[in-house]
């Protein structure tokens, strides 16, 4: 039975990996502003059909938390998604998948700063290992070039997107908003949609073509509704620790799909840098002993 429950979050991670490929396929087919807006508009309408009435009944509970829900919507639906779509124009899906694996590490770092959690052995040493791997990856195996010229624009934007989503997770944990996940998600989406609409208009309201429509549908339904449902089921059945570890499959799935369907080439620096980065993330997730106790 437990093996059965693992299937739900694994499928969720696979959907999110495919959505990374969708972000890359969107380049030249649909404007980042258009797919960002229509994706969350579609998801918001579908969620509202199911959850609008119970959320309205809880409006007295929701009202004091609207500001916080708005901030979460900006971080999770506006900044992360828009930055990721823009990043896809100048970086590979392989790099996007590997950079996304940094989110647990970034969340740990933000938790130390924001939640005042004690740093752990894995957080410190795993963070160092991950940064070394990331530097090797982003420099294409030449760290001196990274120091001299900096990271590519797309890679830097994707890293910023991951930092935004890590902040989303940390604030969600800190604020403990008394709503169930679906109700909270619905309000966050509808906080984000007006902002995304303004962004869409600022880009001269680019149209959705026939080629772009399937990308919007995938991003708006499987990636925004089906995958979160499967992930929440996995969290409930397996617990956060086991389920979160499965997120390490995201770069693996993304790289495989990118090679098969986008024709991307896996270079030695992808394997070495990505592998070292992932090793650091695994250290963060498994070595949870407080650093002070270890030092003592």
Image: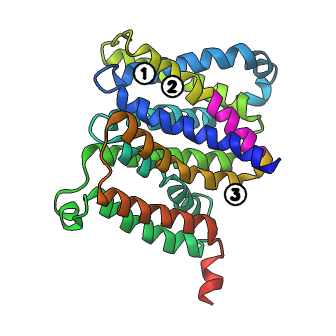
| Residue 227 visible (yes or no) | yes
What's the CA distance linking mark 3 and mark 2?
Answer: 27 Å
| Residue 193 visible (yes or no) | no
Residue extending furthest toward the bottom: 296
What's the CA distance linking mark 3 and mark 1?
Answer: 32 Å
Residue name at image x 67 percent, y 20 percent: 47
Question: Residue 2 at x, y = what percent?
Answer: 80, 50
Question: Residue 259 at x, y = what percent?
Answer: 37, 41
Q: Are marks 3 and 1 in contact (CB under 8 Å)?
A: no
Q: How is the image coloured?
A: rainbow
Q: Quadrant of residue 59?
A: top right
Front residue of 183/258: it is 258
- Verify whether residue 174 appears in magenta: no
Residue extending furthest toward the front: 260
Q: Give the range drawn in magenta.
A: 226-236
SS type, badge 1: helix
Q: Nearer the viewer, mark 2 or mark 1?
A: 2
User: Where 279 sits versus 34, above or below?
Assistant: below
Residue name at image x 58 percent, y 76 percent: 121
Q: Name the residue under label 1.
A: 35
């Amino acid at each position: 039975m437990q093996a059965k429950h693992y299937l739900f979050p694994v499928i969720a991670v696979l959907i999110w990996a495919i959505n990374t490929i969708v972000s890359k396929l969107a380049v030249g087919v649909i404007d980042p502003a258009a797919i960002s807006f229509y994706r969350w508009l579609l998801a918001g309408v579908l969620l509202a059909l199911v959850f609008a009435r119970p959320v309205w009944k809880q409006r007295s509970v929701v009202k004091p938390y609207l500001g916080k829900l708005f901030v979460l919507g900006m971080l999770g639906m506006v900044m992360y998604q828009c930055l990721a779509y823009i990043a896809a124009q100048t970086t590979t899906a392989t790099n996007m998948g590997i950079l996304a694996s940094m989110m647990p590490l970034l969340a740990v770092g933000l938790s130390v700063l924001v939640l005042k959690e004690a740093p752990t052995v894995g957080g410190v040493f795993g963070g160092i290992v991950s940064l070394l791997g990331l530097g090797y990856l982003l420099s294409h195996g030449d760290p001196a070039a990274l120091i001299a010229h900096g990271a590519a624009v797309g890679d830097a934007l994707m890293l910023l997107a991951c930092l935004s989503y890590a902040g989303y997770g940390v604030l969600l944990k800190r604020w403990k908003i008394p709503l169930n996940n679906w109700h909270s998600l619905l309000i966050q989406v509808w906080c984000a949609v007006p902002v995304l609409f303004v962004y869409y208009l600022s880009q001269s309201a680019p149209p959705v073509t026939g080629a772009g429509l399937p990308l919007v549908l995938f991003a708006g339904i499987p990636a925004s509704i089906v995958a979160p449902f499967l992930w929440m089921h996995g969290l409930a059945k397996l617990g956060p620790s086991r389920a979160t570890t499965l997120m390490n499959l995201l770069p693996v799935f993304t790289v495989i799909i990118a090679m098969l369907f986008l024709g991307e080439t896996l270079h030695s620096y992808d394997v070495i840098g990505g592998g070292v980065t992932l090793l650091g993330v695994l250290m963060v997730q498994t070595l949870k002993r407080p650093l002070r106790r270890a030092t003592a």
